[in-house]
Image (cartoon, coloured by chain):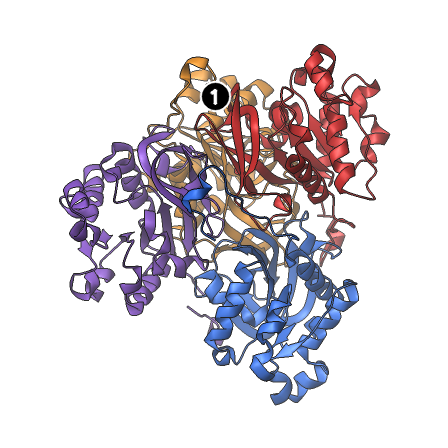
Chain colours: A red, B purple, C blue, D orange
Amino acid sequence: MWGEGRHEQSQPDVAERYPSGMHGAVADAVRAHLSDVDVRTAVLDDPDQGLPDDVLEATDVLTWWGHSAHAEVEDKLVDRVHERVLAGMGLLVLHSAHHSKIFRRLMGTTCNLLWRNEGDRELVWTVDPTHPLAAGVPSPIVLEQHEMYGEFFDIPVPDELVFVSSFSGGEVFRSGCTFRRGAGRIVYFSPGDQDYPIYHHPDVRRVIANAVAWCAPQTPLPGLARVDRADTGWFER
Amino acid sequence: MWGEGRHEQSQPDVAERYPSGMHGAVADAVRAHLSDVDVRTAVLDDPDQGLPDDVLEATDVLTWWGHSAHAEVEDKLVDRVHERVLAGMGLLVLHSAHHSKIFRRLMGTTCNLLWRNEGDRELVWTVDPTHPLAAGVPSPIVLEQHEMYGEFFDIPVPDELVFVSSFSGGEVFRSGCTFRRGAGRIVYFSPGDQDYPIYHHPDVRRVIANAVAWCAPQTPLPGLARVDRADTGWFER
Amino acid sequence: MWGEGRHEQSQPDVAERYPSGMHGAVADAVRAHLSDVDVRTAVLDDPDQGLPDDVLEATDVLTWWGHSAHAEVEDKLVDRVHERVLAGMGLLVLHSAHHSKIFRRLMGTTCNLLWRNEGDRELVWTVDPTHPLAAGVPSPIVLEQHEMYGEFFDIPVPDELVFVSSFSGGEVFRSGCTFRRGAGRIVYFSPGDQDYPIYHHPDVRRVIANAVAWCAPQTPLPGLARVDRADTGWFER
Amino acid sequence: MWGEGRHEQSQPDVAERYPSGMHGAVADAVRAHLSDVDVRTAVLDDPDQGLPDDVLEATDVLTWWGHSAHAEVEDKLVDRVHERVLAGMGLLVLHSAHHSKIFRRLMGTTCNLLWRNEGDRELVWTVDPTHPLAAGVPSPIVLEQHEMYGEFFDIPVPDELVFVSSFSGGEVFRSGCTFRRGAGRIVYFSPGDQDYPIYHHPDVRRVIANAVAWCAPQTPLPGLARVDRADTGWFER
């Protein structure tokens, strides 16, 4: 559970809202719903920006929250996370991490969106009731106050669209999306601004745990075998 | 441009709102934007329910609006329209035709949705700016008053999601969707309740024309050729 | 595990190949890979065509193999299976069941395809290595001899395309596809002609078990709650 | 019509096969099928690598063929092409350009694939007969000899899958795919190795022209308007 961990230092209200950090609240949500999962947290200001090689290699699913310090994440770390996702590691991208280097790298687009932080009510509607992301939560999930994120959200067409939100101002947003890249599964879930206690909301916590479970790699990863003229060495991977 | 044509008879306000019928307003929209298109209208109470064989055979794109008399549409007509769509005829399904026999037949689901007719403001947001359906209209299209249609909308996952609407009550709706079935293209576009002058709205008229143009069959339809063991008679179509 | 069960009666070679019926072989595959699953079999010639109400109500995932007797399946049974799928029951459609009434009802298309029964080698390639359907099997799965099923396969665009097959004659086929309809998940998997021992192939058995696991309904099914003006009674489901 | 233009210099057989360059053959295909289109060609060894700012700004659809010199394309040119695609320019990516910097940037994946250059017969099957890419060509298109490209092709799930190829060796490949990124449309079409006269094949030429037409930007591009609290300055684009 990777967090930028800066707002907790610079804004007393955030530190008070999230005493163990936003990443800590995300970790709690996963622990609360998923047994037999080994959950660790890391932040930008940790050594190796929290993700030394051995940690990254041992990670099945990485969650990513960032906002004010996207530019400080080193490109070589982004390269390594990118490789890991393509090799099968799951990635849950949260809220303002829509503008993180890793998400933009994986999407190939600007990932721009509309936004306005005026405490709109957000309703998160399920549009795919067959999807594990939506298991156990009502439709809509009601967030009494949240930052508005609106369309056009400049992402590739999601492989699966699970949640669509509305806001008091009338905007809509594709707030729960999945993507496959290489052997890896990616979820983008937009709730989670630092100015609101979103990660204490029971339905949001359930979706986070659902997403982590859904992102986990298949075991074993499907292999790619050779047929026929295997001796010609054409197998590239 | 097929219309049920009943509300225009039973409700004076609808007749006043649409002097040439709702189908007439749809036809006007198409004529206004697409030159070189031969536009005809038909209604349920016409002979052969408006669609005798020769007319249907000569139709490249059919638009369908119905509401109170879905059950009166004969199954054999639904069969013929179904066959025509699979053979390549375009179909634009409008508003309450979500519950028409032909749409349910093509979708394989209930096509149920939430609804409430209290004059909500509807905002129709473009979520796919590359799509011809959205050409030339603002995002959002603003409908000051309209019936609310909300999720969950029980349709298959659309092949393309172009518009998502919000409503004053906070609901969201996948209001512009495309589907391919057989060799045919289908658009569902939800604006168009009889109680509001929606089909006089310039942006809605533009989308209707865009949809008709997009639905038109490819000429010539892609053929399916035989290779190799064609003599074994395995070609089925 | 529902089977038509007729070829086993009329063709001694099929009875010899599948002593417990083709449905029996499918059931064995599921039992071999999924513990804690209660597997039952049923055939067309059983009372109530094998699926009385109480059995259908107690079924989480239904597998369907049919070929020569699609027309004998009663429409009212198809209605009930259709309702159950839309309510969340998983459905695995096997091989020649592409032409079953229930699959055509759910798809809304002819589900026609090319075919030729001359013992082509079929290679089943994974095109989505993130998908649970493909877990634990090589790419390609090699079927030394099988009936050819080829494109154009007249289905809606699958929600997920997992397997694509090639055949000795040069044809290709979307052989592993998923679809969501209502609250239900559907898999179509094409291997399994009665003239070949396909359901004894270890990789095919694994895919069948993967598919059954993937199709199982979410527990609990996501609910749809009311917001705001719930008193207006607009909630329809 | 951008071409790397190197094989034509280093391999006499390629120069003989394509006297006006491979890009010249692509340009001929477009001119032959699309009237009222202003077609220009450019190569890597032209000033500004063939794409100075004014040329790129004036380009509605860019076609890209490269193979041996992907690394020589300057990153700042890739940046500019990327921006143009997101702003609405169409992009047709041909054959070995699967490994071009621009395609990998837009896809976010390795774009790796299997390959073997032994003159396999390739059959290009249409799996979406409603798509304009497939208009006017048989299914399959028969390429008597071509390089094999096979799955797993490490791309995001295409928005539309139009062609699937088989090869003599038994491999399959998603050979005609579309993607939307930002306001731009992208087509990947795999036929076109320098060692074979593929771009003289009439069906391939037709698909190239179809793709160029399909990629062209909507005019005018859909706008994004403000609603409600526009004064808060939240509009980002």
Which is nearer the eye, D161 or A158?
A158
Give x and y (percent) for residue C49: 57, 80
- Going 44% across and 57% down the picture, which residue do you hit? B110
Foreground residue among D177 and B140? B140
Q: Nearer the viewer, residue D108 or A116?
A: A116
Chain for disc number 1: D
Q: Residue C39's quadrant in the figure?
A: bottom right
Closest to the observer: D205 or C194? C194
Q: Tell which residue pokes out farthest to the top in this image.
A: A10
The x, y position of residue B18, in whole percent, is 17, 43
Q: Is residue B62 left or right of residue C15?
A: left
Q: Please determine whether, in this image, residue B145 is positioned above or below residue A232.
A: above
Count of labels in the image: 1
Is residue A106 visible in the rendered structure shown here? Answer: yes
Considering every residue shown, the one lying at the far front of the view is C231
Q: Residues within 10 Å of mark 1 (few under 14, many from 20)?
A: many
* In the image, residue B62 above or below residue C45: above
Left or right: where does residue C32 sit relative to residue D127?
right
Is residue B227 shown above or below D121?
below
The residue positioned farthest toward the right in the image shown? A54
Determine the secondary structure under disc 1.
loop
Which residue: 35% across, 39% down?
B133
Name above or below for residue B209 compared with residue C107. above
| Residue at mark 1 | D51
Pinpoint residue A82: horizontal percent, then vertical percent. Answer: 70, 31
Q: Position of residue C93 (x, y in %)?
A: 58, 66
Residue C114 visible here: no
Check disc 1 and give the amino acid type.
Answer: Leu
Q: Quadrant of the N terminus of chain D?
A: top left
Corner quadrant of residue D61? top left
Q: Would residue C50 appear left or right of B190 to someone viewing this image?
A: right
